[in-house]
Image (spheres, grey):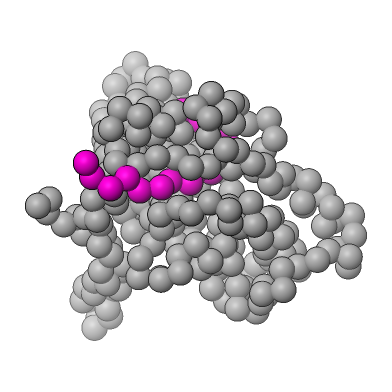
């Protein structure tokens, strides 16, 4: 029997992708087990899905963290290892020319919340952290503490669009509004930007003339429920490798990008 890896999961809502992952683990389609589920929302319905499978759960209420900070920013306790200048330079979530006061507030609030997440995760040994509808972008503060080795990413996300098109929170909606003829979903590793990490796998499906946003989302979810477990299994088999690629561009410029290669199965 193959060695089973240990998965942690973060969610914000109903947890349908979480359920697909749990089901795949229990049916041995993934050589893995889910060892914890965390959420940024106390009312997340996906927490009950985890409880039904006797999976430990925890909540870090991001809204409460933000409210507490804004009530008394001077009294906020930032993590002792938080370096604002360093995180500000690394992050790719907000533009570098964004209002500095707003940017710094965002990064400080996220650092407090992410430190609480890391503390809640600390009792659990895990190999891979999967974001299953977790609606909070992660900052370099969190990412670098999960990815002890930057060459070996350990945070995976699924996105409702064919990246790099349509990052953000409404990928299926953006796909429809732009008049695209195909829609799809993407599994990728998480980096410092918004849905910009190296792509692991994608699924596409045609948009029909009679489709609505509701039918596209439903068909997209059905693809997600298959694709995400498949990509996790590739990780479990040790078949995902990140490599740095360079491509010459007109004018002597060079485009550099970290990509995922899928190794053959032996």
261 sits left or right of 83 in the view: left
Q: Is residue 64 visible?
A: yes
Q: Residue, x 30% and y 27% (percent of image)?
A: 27
Q: Is residue 245 above or below residue 252?
A: above
Relative to the observer, which residue lies in front, 34 or 153?
34
Q: Is residue 163 above or below residue 101?
A: above
Q: Residue, x 68% and y 55% (percent of image)?
A: 116
**Residue 166 is inside the magenta segment:** no
Residue extending furthest front?
1
Q: Residue, x 59% and y 67% (percent of image)?
A: 141
How many marks overall? 0
- x and y, in percent, of residue 159 in the image: 42, 43
- x and y, in percent, of residue 258 in the image: 31, 67
Q: Residue, x 25% and y 69% (percent of image)?
A: 243
Which region is colored magenta? 1-16
Relative to the observer, which residue lies in front, 194 or 222?
222
**Residue 10 is inside the magenta segment:** yes
Q: Is residue 100 above or below residue 176?
A: below
């Amino acid at each position: 029997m193959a060695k089973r890896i240990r998965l942690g999961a973060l969610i914000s809502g109903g947890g349908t992708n979480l359920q697909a992952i749990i089901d795949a683990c229990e049916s041995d389609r993934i050589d893995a087990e889910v060892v914890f589920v965390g959420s940024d929302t106390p009312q997340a319905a996906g927490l009950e899905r985890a409880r039904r499978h006797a999976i430990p759960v925890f909540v870090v209420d991001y809204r409460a963290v933000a409210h507490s900070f804004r009530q008394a920013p001077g009294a906020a306790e930032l993590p002792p290892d938080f370096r604002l200048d360093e995180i500000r330079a690394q992050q790719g979530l907000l533009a570098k020319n964004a209002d500095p006061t707003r940017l710094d507030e965002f990064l400080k609030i996220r650092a407090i919340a992410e430190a609480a997440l890391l503390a809640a995760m600390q009792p659990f040994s895990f190999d891979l952290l999967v974001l299953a509808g977790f609606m909070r972008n992660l900052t370099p503060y969190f990412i670098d503490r999960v990815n002890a080795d930057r060459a070996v990413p350990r945070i995976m996300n699924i996105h409702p669009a064919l990246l790099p098109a349509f990052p953000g929170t409404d990928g299926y909606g953006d796909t429809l509004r732009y008049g695209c003829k195909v829609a799809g979903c993407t599994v990728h590793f998480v980096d410092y930007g918004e849905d910009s990490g190296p792509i692991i796998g994608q699924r596409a499906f045609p948009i029909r003339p009679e489709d609505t946003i509701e039918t596209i989302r439903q068909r997209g979810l059905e693809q997600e429920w298959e694709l995400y477990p498949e990509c996790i299994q590739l990780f479990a088999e040790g078949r995902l490798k990140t490599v740095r690629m360079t491509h010459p561009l007109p004018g002597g410029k060079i485009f550099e990008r970290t990509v995922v290669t899928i190794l053959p199965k032996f």
